[in-house]
Amino acid sequence: QARFLANDFMPSHVESACGLRDAAGITNLTILPDSFADLAARGDLPPCDFIVAHGIFSWVSAENQAHILTIVRRLLKPGGLFYVSYNSAVGWAGMGALRQFLVAQVEQDQGPLIGRLGRALDRAALFAQAGQGIPTLDGLAHLVQALRQEDPAYLVHEYLNANWQPLYPTQVTAMMMGAGLSPVGPVQLADTMDATAWPPTLRPFMADHAAGPLRELMGDIAVNRSFRGDLYGRDVQRLADGDLARQRDAARFTLAAPAGQCQPLAARPFHMVPLDPAAHAAILDRLGAGTTDLGTLRALPAVRVLGP
């Protein structure tokens, strides 16, 4: 019952996506090959309930960021949501110098791009080895080793993009507010819960700060976050407590992996958060019987004693 519009400037991506759509018999998806400037200039696009920009905003030029905001400003309905993900400048601070080193090495070299990147990584590794025992260069060696585990195509996209520019959440929020949007919160639900968002020693301090871009920046600093996904809205109405509780309890869940693979731990940026073993087992047992809603899970005796 929904209609989807997708866009990509790379013809091969559009061709691949159209092939998948047609093979699956999907009829409610339109895929456009436009640039952001072309999209912003079009007058035939419908208003949207949701607009998604995943892995785009901190990899394009300031001009294209402005085009994206123009698209959102024109097309997002009142009550609509805009999802934007981007590299957080806090977590990328240590990688910035390595990226500049790799870019400079690649520019001085010749031949296919992936080969040049491989030789640049080799050069960075030799640099780190020559300075073994120097803390910063020992850290560089670990970074290079980690990069060697990544897909070369990803490394080219991430590190050799001329418009690569990680952003702070305070910067992004200011840009969104300039487009008539207001912050709703992080897209990861666990990041909105103090018990799973911050290390335990930090929670009392963070509780003294109102939700907003400054608090998000502080959180990025605390856990050295390198990637964010945030929601912004246009004229979004906050739910009353009763409506929020009803919608929350109606959310449905299903078991996505065999119960035996589900450990009572939640991976968070600062550490593994232990879950209550009895409640965890009860939830897995109920989900093993089929999909259910959160209200049903909360009513399980082992869960109910924990409170909301």
Image (cartoon, grey):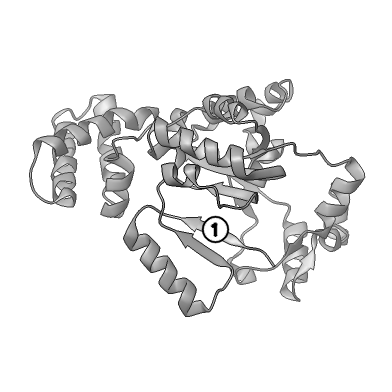
Q: At which x and y percent is residue 97?
A: 28, 27
Residue drawn at x 41%, y 54% is 8
Residue drawn at x 52%, y 63% is 30
Q: At which x and y percent is residue 185?
A: 67, 37
Residue drawn at x 13%, y 44% is 119
Callout 1 secondary element: strand
Q: Is residue 168 left or right of residue 162?
A: right
Q: Is residue 11 left or right of residue 72?
A: left
The answer to whether any part of residue 67 appears in the image is yes
Outermost residue toward the right in this view: 242
Residue topped by disc 1: 5
Q: Is residue 291 left or right of residue 307?
A: left
Q: Amino acid at mark 1?
A: Leu
Q: Quadrant of residue 26?
A: bottom right
Nearer to the camera, 28 or 231: 28
Up/down of 298 relative to 163, above or below: below
Up/down of 118 relative to 19, above or below: above
Q: At which x and y percent is residue 222?
A: 55, 28
The answer to whether any part of residue 87 appears in the image is no
Outermost residue toward the front in this view: 43
Nearer to the camera, 219 or 199: 219
